Amino acid sequence: MINREDNPDFLNSFLDYTVTILNKSPNTIKEYNYDLATFLKFIKVHFKMTDEENFSNITIKDMSIDTLKKIKLDDIHAFLSYLTNTYHSKATTRARKVSSIRVFFNYLCAKANLIEINPAQNLETPKLDRRLPKYLSLEDSIKLLDVTSNEDNRNYQRDYAIITLFLNCGMRLAELVGINIQDIDFSENRMTVIGKGNKERAVYLNKACVHAVNEYLAVRPKEGIKTDKLNSKNALFLSERKERISRRTVQNIVDKELKAAGLDTNKYSVHKLRHTAATLMYQYGNVDIRALQEVLGHESISTTEIYTHVANEQARDAIENNPLANI
C-alpha cells in the first residue's frame, strides 16, 4: 500500500499521471513509488541534505523541485553504483530502477514542465544476462499434476485447477489471481485475463483446463463469500477464508505441491510453471513464435524468442550425447 502522505507533491502527481494517462497497473504504481522513493532518499544523502544513513528513516516529503533541477546523469549513475556495491543488486533490479527513473524525469520535463533539462535522457539500461529459463520436463509436469490431484488434500480440486492452468496456459500469477468466473466463456473454451499494463487478452482453454475448472466450480463455495473490494464474490479461485485467493497463497500451494512431487523448490516456482508451459508448447506443439507471443502476452517478440533458444540448446545436447561423439 502506498502512503502518499510520505511523498512530495511532484511524486504523487507523477503517480496520478501513470494511473490516469499511462494506465499502469497497481503493482507497477507500487514499484514506481518504491523505486523513486529509494532514489530520492539516496539523492538527499548524496547531496548531503541529511546526516541520516538509514534509508528507512530518511524523509523525502520536504524535497523541492529545485533539488530535482540539480540532478545530473552522473548522480543517477552514482545511485546505480550504490545499489550494486551496497545491495549487490542484479542487473534486472537496476534495469527496473532505470525504467522508473526514465519515465519519472520524462514526466517532469516533457509533461509537467517542472524541470527544463532531463538528466535521464541518455540514461542507458544495464546490460542483462540472457539466461535460459528453468522449466519442468514433461515427465515432471505430469508428476506434479498427479500429486496435486491427491484427494487427501481437502482443496485438491482448486489446487489441481490452478496447477493445470499454469502448466497449460502459461499465465502469470497476477493474471490467475485476477480471474473472475464471468471471464470464462465455456461455449468458446476461452478466458479473458488482464496482463501487464492492464492489457486484456484471450486465453484459450484445452480439454484439461475446462475439465479441471468445472471440477473445481462444482465444489467452489457458494455461500458466505466475503463482500469486499477484492470482488471476491465473482473471483474464480477462493481461499479457505472465502475471499479472492492471494498471490502468496497460490505461491504456497505451488511450493507445497512441488515438494510433494519431489521437485526442488529452490529451482522451481510459480513463474517457472509459466516457463514450463511455454517450453512444452514450443517443443511439442509445433507453435509459431508469433502465436506463442500472443499466448504469453509478451509485448516484444524478443522476450518470446528465449524459448527458441531452449530448443536450440536441447538440439546441441542431443548432438553432444550421441554415442559416437567421443569416438
Image (spheres, rainbow, N blue to C red):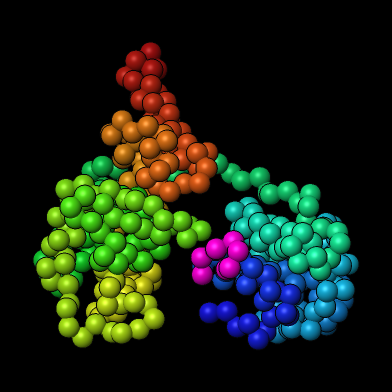
> Does 194 appear above or below 299?
below
> Does 196 appear above or below 290?
below
Return the residue found at the far top.
Answer: 327
Q: Is residue 158 left or right of residue 309?
A: left
Q: Is residue 81 left or right of residue 183?
A: right
Q: In the rendered image, is residue 54 in sight?
A: no
Residue at 82%, 58% (x, y): give it.
119
**Nearer to us in this view, 140 or 300:** 300
Give the magenta-colored segment's residue range: 19-26
Quadrant in the rendering for residue 164: bottom left
Residue at 72%, 79% (x, y): give it.
9
Quadrant in the rendering for residue 129: top right
**Nearer to us in this view, 75 or 287:** 287
**Nearer to us in this view, 120 or 227:** 227
Quadrant in the rendering for residue 31: bottom right
Residue at 75%, 72% (x, y): give it.
40
- Residue 20 magenta-highlighted: yes
x, y (%) of residue 268? 37, 54
Quadrant (top left, top right, bottom left, bottom right) of the C terminus = top left
